[in-house]
């Protein structure tokens, strides 16, 4: 297993009126993050806040190319990013104990925080298709170039882990500095991993090793 320190490329925020960052996603141009009672978008090049959507946004956030998906308590909302309308909802697999959320290959992947699991689910029904076990609290999940990454956060320790999507075996870890937690995770499809900063109210970009 490869083990190294996380290389933090940039820190975005703090953002006006944002006390906590939950889920993080990327729509190919802008970064979205959940902050409790709304979804917020910013430009990762300039760091400028762009817009927000008033919708319950408590944990993981995902984007499928057309829609945003947002964890809100015990459900996952499908949202039109242009209008902010909630188009449909499905039950979250953890019943409110869910954390990270990402989209890959036509399905949603959901982290279950204290249960230390990642579920692949049907985005139409919420049915669980497969489950991967972790040995740490799961706080974010993302796919990039066929790699499954997830974030962990326990006490003052947080890291990013690349895991085998079949077995859950840890292949690589990136350690965050002590006291710097990760509350949401998304890739930009390249060499950046966007990480929610939890109660600090920021988003950090971490380099993804090649």
Image (cartoon, rainbow, N blue to C red):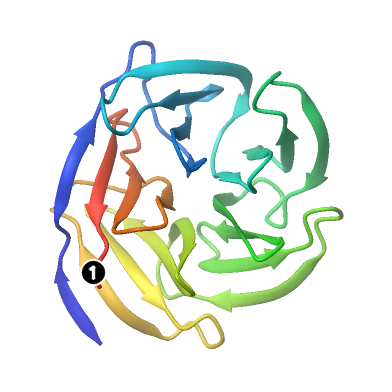
Which quarter of the rendered picture does the N terminus lie within? bottom left
Left or right placement of residue 45 versus residue 75 in this view:
left
In this rendering, the answer to whether 74 lies above or below 177 is above
Position in image of residue 39 (x %, y %): 54, 25
Which of these two is toward me, 42 or 161? 42
Identify the residue at image location x=57%, y=54%.
102
**Element type where label 1 sits in the image:** loop
Query: Of residues 66 and 137, which is closer to you in this image?
Result: 66
Q: Position of residue 114 (x, y in %)?
A: 50, 59
Question: Residue 149 placed where, x, y %?
Answer: 42, 67
- Residue 150, placed above or below residue 132: above
Mark count:
1
Q: Quadrant of residue 3 in the image?
A: bottom left
On screen, residue 134 versus residue 7, left or right, reads: right
Reading the image, the residue beneath label 1 is 209
Q: In what quadrant of the picture does the C terminus appear?
A: bottom left
Q: Which residue is drawn at 43% across and 62% down?
A: 137
Q: Nearer the viewer, residue 194 or 138?
A: 194
Decide: is 137 above or below 135: above
Q: How crowded is the residue under tag 1: few (<14 C-alpha within 10 Å), some, or many (20+)?
A: few
The residue closer to the viewer here, 97 or 120, is: 120
């Amino acid at each position: 297993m490869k083990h190294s320190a996380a290389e933090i490329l940039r820190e975005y925020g703090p953002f006006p009126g944002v006390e906590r960052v939950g889920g993080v996603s990327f729509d190919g141009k802008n970064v979205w993050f959940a902050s409790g009672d709304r979804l917020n978008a910013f430009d990762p090049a300039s760091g400028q806040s762009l817009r927000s959507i008033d919708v319950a946004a408590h944990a993981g956030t995902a984007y499928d190319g057309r829609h945003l998906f947002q964890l809100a308590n015990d459900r996952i909302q499908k949202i039109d990013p242009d209008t902010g309308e909630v188009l449909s909802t499905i039950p979250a697999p953890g019943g409110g104990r869910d954390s990270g959320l990402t989209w890959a290959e036509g399905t949603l992947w959901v982290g279950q925080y204290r249960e230390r699991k990642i579920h692949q689910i049907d985005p139409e029904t919420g049915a669980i298709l497969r489950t991967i076990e972790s040995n740490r609290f799961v706080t974010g999940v993302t796919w990039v170039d066929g790699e499954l990454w997830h974030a962990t956060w326990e006490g003052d320790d947080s890291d990013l882990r690349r895991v085998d999507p079949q077995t859950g075996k840890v292949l690589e870890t990136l350690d965050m500095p002590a006291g710097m937690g990760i509350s949401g995770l998304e890739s930009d499809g390249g060499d950046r991993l966007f990480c929610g900063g939890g109660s600090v109210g920021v988003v950090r970009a971490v380099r993804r090793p090649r």
